[in-house]
Image (spheres, grey):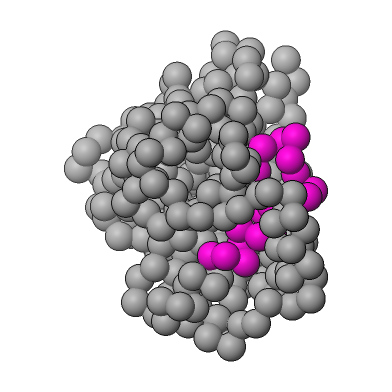
Amino acid sequence: MKQLEYNLRPMQNHDVTSIVSLWNSLYTYDRRELPQIISVLRDTEGVSQSQTLLAVDSKARIVGFVLLAIGQPENTKIVAYLRAIAAAPEKIQVVFPVFMEYLEGIVPQYCVDSIECCRFNRGAYLFPGIDVRYQSVIAALKTTGFVEAEQLFDVEHLHLLQFIPNEFQQETLKTLQNAGIVITPYKADAELLMETFIQRSGVDYWFSRGWREELVRIRTLIAHNDISILGYAQYRPSGNHADFGPVAVLPDWRQQGIGTSLLLYAMQDMKMNNVRQAGAHWVWPLEYYLRNSWEVAREYVALRKQLSL
């Protein structure tokens, strides 16, 4: 490797406070407290290898950090995830290439052909992608070979107390009822049916070890017929606001209005409990929310760098 203006070293415990300051100086729309940063730096769920590196200048001052995770979250594909990257705002154009040169030198041993930026889908994360307002960050990553791979969105509904189901929602609900599909709160006696749903859902990685307790503790709705759970959704109220999600429907039962009905029931439930506003993060597909009277609150981009093996 050529002589670098900044040296790299592994993170040590006493570095975390500096990392928090560095993060907050760059990502002003996503300021994080110390416990949030620690939870991501320590999280290893679904990760076979992870590495947190710091860039330091000639006076040993921390000017950047990067968190790379290498795991096997989908089928048998091994993926390299750039879970977090930051630098002093005035130094990203020089620090990011230093990080990427090093990382590109170590990831081939894991037989990965690309590096995904921030789309790590297990465990704790700082944000799902790069907010489009961070144009300097996106530009700096692109200079190292990253390209935009996907758009991601946060959405919101700001007027739940005035919410009235529209004609599309009412017709969807009626169609499901005629098909014998109902939506009810989840109860612990549905645990065996939920186990089957998780196995068939295609998003089983959403359900960590404590899912049984979580589904009882968090407001959870299920769509089911007489024999199976076909979909589920959750929301978390906090005062007048609630976070909606996740929501999932079995692959064979999608495009039949189950997801729409789960969202409708959740919105009505929130309204009954005097929740005025709701938000959902990192949503897909966006159209699902737009046609149910939600609006885009934030836009991100996920990036990918193809490697030459």
In the picture, the quarter occupied by the N terminus is top right
Between 38 and 136, the one lying in front of the other is: 38
Q: Residue at x 44, y 49 (%)?
A: 186
In the rendered structure, does residue 252 fall within the stretch colored magenta? yes
Where residue 208 sits, quadrant-wise, is top left
Q: Is residue 178 above or below residue 264?
A: above
Q: Residue at x 67, y 54 (%)?
A: 259
Task: Tell me residue 19's x, y (percent).
Answer: 34, 50
In the rendered structure, does residue 222 fall within the stretch colored magenta? no
- The answer to whether residue 185 is seen in the rendering is yes
Q: Which stretch did the figure color magenta?
A: 248-266
Farthest residue, direction left:
14
Task: Tell me residue 290's x, y (percent).
Answer: 74, 69
Q: Residue at x 74, y 30 (%)?
A: 306
Q: Residue at x 54, y 65 (%)?
A: 266
Where residue 170 sits, quadrant-wise, is bottom right
Between 146 and 170, the one lying in front of the other is: 170
Task: Tell me residue 59's x, y (percent).
Answer: 30, 46
Task: Tell me residue 265's x, y (percent).
Answer: 57, 65
In the image, is 176 to the left or to the right of 40? Answer: right
Q: Is residue 241 above or below residue 192?
A: below
Between 232 and 155, the one lying in front of the other is: 232
Between 271 and 43, the one lying in front of the other is: 271
Q: Is residue 106 above or below residue 290?
A: above
- Magenta segment main secondary structure: helix
In the picture, the quarter occupied by the C terminus is top right
In the image, is 54 to the left or to the right of 249? Answer: left
- The answer to whether residue 275 is seen in the rendering is no
Number of on-image labels: 0
